[in-house]
Image: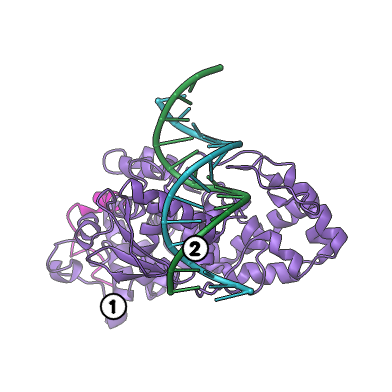
Chain colours: A purple, B green, C cyan
Amino acid sequence: MQRHLAVVGAQEEKENGEEASRLLENPMAGSCEISNLISNYISAMYQQEESPPPDPDLLTHLGDDDSLSLPLSNTSMTAETTGKPTWYGEMPHCWSRSQVLEWISYHVEKNKYDASAIDFSCCNMDGYTLCQYTRDQLGLIFGPLGDELYDRLHEITSVPDELGWIMSVLRNEDASQEALLDSSPLELANSCSQDYLDEMKLANLFSQPDLGYISGAMSPDSSASLAGTMSQSPQSQDSGGSDLDLDPTDMKHCTFSDGDYAEYKKEDLKKRKRGRPRKVSKDNTDCLETKKSKHSPRGIHLWEFIRDILIHPEMNEGLLKWEDRREGIFKFLRSEAVAQLWGQKKKNSSMTYEKLSRAMRYYYKREILERVDGRRLVYKFGKNSSGWKEEEVQNRS
DNA sequence: CATCAGTTTCCTGGTT
DNA sequence: GAACCAGGAAACTGAT
């Protein structure tokens, strides 16, 4: 999907969409800042829409129904302060009925489409409903314009890989846990067939209608990384309040017999892992990560990953919180969950807060982070970090 | 191939 | 005692 959009973007939006295409093709580009990607992407996506608003005279025949009447003046068509359409900059899922109509009428105008061919009685829908329509359904309602509307809509709703990945993982924590519970111990013990099962479960998970937009935003490698999610134990808690533990090695606590677990561990050791080799104990003979033949390319840094969770409350989900936004002081609320998320990002299901915090401590030396003495799970951004200050975040959007 | 940055893993000891 | 913090050491990966 992302690749497809990138191609479409390159072809159809050459002038204004090149940045968006570049970002879609390579979401790790530049500073790897998710918020930059979002604002750049959305801004690029909308730039072409900044041409003059639709002809007010168009579609004036729509009837008397208030809910169906198109906004016909420039003031209603555009946000008063910006001069842009009211739907500009908002995600389609959040559009009101009138915004949907504005958007449709804009595309009617833009494509010089014969509005009389459209059954506008079918346009009385909000953005969320609009997003549920398939290409075919839009085609039925809008004829040839349906394809165009579908493409434009899905360009806007597709978020960059990086953000989409995190959001999808967060949003599917529960579903993943259910998937695990559905698996028999035998299945889980067989890492080869389990690979396949995981793939299939993920495919199902992300092809659910209401998750469709999420799957579209998944990063290409996320299915593999989600092996960790798929195998998370139902509930475990650390003292710091973490409520997730996605480490497959912990599955021994719930589903493996001794023999199964030994088999499972054997698989693990076949794979080379990043960092110092793990100490091999008698019963430690391996794990699921064997399935990953290749490590992900160097991408987002840990501190950027943390920062991006912090500055996007919608995907924070109680993982981290600001203690003092101005000072850049933040706290881990669910330390193990953040660690697991980071582990998934790096395709390392054995990531723990212990290890993550070691990496965090290395940032002290580089002044990306500053020490906050006497406070557990609390860190502070240092002078060599960027992109977390409110001004910086606002300037991007 | 060598080097380097950025982790990852392990560990010991200290603190909360 | 568990969880967390601090930081040394070694190893690893991907980039250059």
Q: Which region of the structure is painted magenta?
A: A43-62
Residue occupying the far right of the picture: A259
Q: Badge 2: how crowded within 10 Å, few (<14), some, or many (20+)? A: many
- Asked if badge 1 and badge 2 are on a common chain, one would say yes
Instruction: Check disc 1 and report the residue beneath it.
Output: A63
State left or right for residue A213 relative to residue C16. right
- The kind of secondary structure element at disc 1 is loop
User: Where, quadrant-wise, is the C terminus of chain A in this rendering?
Assistant: bottom left
Residue A333 place in picture, x, y as percent:
45, 72
Residue A369 place in picture, x, y as percent:
33, 54
Which secondary structure dominates the residues rendered in magenta?
loop
Residue A228 place in picture, x, y as percent:
63, 58
Q: Nearer the viewer, residue A271 or A285?
A: A285
Residue A54 among magenta residues: yes
The residue that appears at 26% across and 39% down in the rendered structure is A15
The residue that appears at 57% across and 42% down in the rendered structure is A275
